[in-house]
Amino acid sequence: SRDQAKVGKYVKKANLKAGDLVFFDTTNDGKINHVGIYIGNGKFIHSSPVNRVGINDLQKGYWKDKYKTARRVI
């Protein structure tokens, strides 16, 4: 995920479109270590050991504070 965050074009959180990659720091060490795919309406899909493949909200809960950046690769 850290290398993926360097590819494509930077996208502001307010300008996300379905298909954009969204990146997170889940360990609070300043390093990106998780990626998901934005699916619209403030939500993204991803895979994690906790909930396997799931859909979560970028705007609230755990993921709100873990979000770091987004990239548009297509």
Image (cartoon, helix red, strand yellow):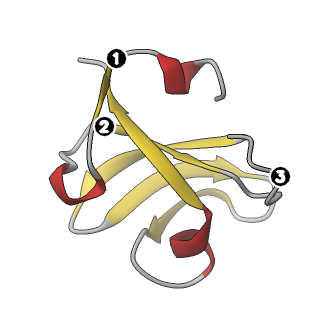
Residue appearing at x 46%, y 83% in the figure: 60
Whether the residues at callouts 1 and 2 have beta carbons within 8 Å, the answer is no
Left or right: residue 58 versus residue 10 is right
Q: What residue type is labelled 1?
A: Gly
Label located before the other in sequence (1 or 3) = 1
Q: Which of marks 1 and 3 is in front?
A: 3
Residue 12 in picture, x, y percent from top left: 26, 48
**Residue in the picture at 52% in, 27% down:** 5
Residue visible at 74% across and 41% down in the picture: 31
Above or below — where is 3 with respect to 59? above
The image quarter containing residue 33 is top right
State the CA–CA distance, disc 1 to disc 3. Answer: 24 Å
Residue 20: which numbered mark, if any? 2
Compute the Cα span from label 3 to label 2: 24 Å
Image quarter hosting the C terminus: top left
Q: Residue at x 16, y 51 (%)?
A: 15
* Crowd rating for badge 3 (residues with CA inside 10 Å; few <14, some 14–19, many 20+): few
Total number of numbered labels?
A: 3
Query: Residue 29 has which mark?
Result: 3
Crowding around mark 2 (Cα neighbors within 10 Å: few <14, some 14 to 19, many 20+) is: many
Looking at the picture, does residue 71 appear above or below residue 9? below
Q: Where is residue 34 in the image (x, y as percent from the top left)?
A: 66, 43
The amino acid beneath tag 2 is Asp
Residue 3, by quadrant, is top right
Q: Quadrant of the N terminus?
A: top right
Frontmost residue, 69 versus 49: 69
Q: Do the residues labelled 1 and 3 touch (CB within 8 Å)?
A: no
